[in-house]
């Protein structure tokens, strides 16, 4: 019997993958790529463990790399609240610098895309995904330092 999984609290992504491997939730597909079963549930569980352990730095590092199109759920706001409660201003600033930078990049891409296909695309298609998403736009006033 395998000993229980103990995350390192150093690398969120690697801990999540090791947890799934230890639980036997991985397999290879026909192309030889590793497929993780139950990945989103494991992400949620690992996020919980990291929050409980107050391992905020690896979470911030992960969120800074996170692809915004994949969605944050409520985790971004929860991490923000934890950082505010712990008064870890440098990590909070680092986290939201990435959020703002990605928003600016997305806005520029949307603007360029709208200009390029203004005549080719049906009306409204160019700007179909508002940034920031409504979920982020409302609580932003809560995080001002």
Image (cartoon, rainbow, N blue to C red):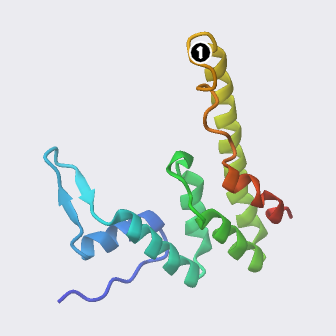
**Looking at the image, residue 116 lies above or below residue 56:** above
In the picture of the structure, the residue carrying the numbered disc 1 is: 117
Quarter of the view holding residue 108: top right
Q: Residue at x 54, y 53 (%)?
A: 71
Q: Nearer the viewer, residue 119 or 40?
A: 119
Q: Residue 94: image x %, image y %?
A: 71, 58
Q: Quadrant of the C terminus?
A: bottom right
Left or right of 61 in this view: 87: right
Element class at badge 1? loop
Which residue is most to the left? Answer: 30
Q: Residue 78: image x %, image y %?
A: 65, 71
Q: Residue 142: image x %, image y %?
A: 81, 65
Left or right of 27 in this view: 4: right
Which residue is most to the top? Answer: 119
Q: Nearer the viewer, residue 124 or 75?
A: 124
Q: Residue at x 70, y 68 (%)?
A: 80
CA neighbours of label 1 inside 10 A, class few (<14), some (14 to 19), many (20+): few
**Looking at the image, residue 69 lies above or below residue 136:** above
């Amino acid at each position: 019997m395998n000993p229980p999984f103990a995350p390192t609290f150093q690398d969120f992504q690697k801990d999540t993958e090791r947890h799934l491997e230890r639980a036997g939730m991985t397999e290879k597909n026909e192309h030889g790529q590793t497929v993780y079963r139950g990945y989103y549930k494991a992400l949620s569980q690992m996020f919980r463990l990291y929050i409980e352990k107050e391992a905020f730095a690896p979470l911030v590092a992960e969120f800074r790399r996170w692809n915004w199109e994949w969605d944050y759920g409520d985790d971004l706001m929860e991490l923000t609240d934890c950082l505010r409660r712990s008064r870890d201003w440098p990590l909070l600033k680092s986290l939201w610098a990435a959020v703002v930078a990605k928003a600016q990049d997305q806005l520029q891409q949307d603007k360029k895309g709208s200009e390029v296909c203004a005549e080719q695309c049906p009306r409204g298609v160019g700007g179909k995904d508002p940034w920031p998403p409504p979920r982020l736009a409302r609580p932003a006033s809560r995080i001002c330092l």
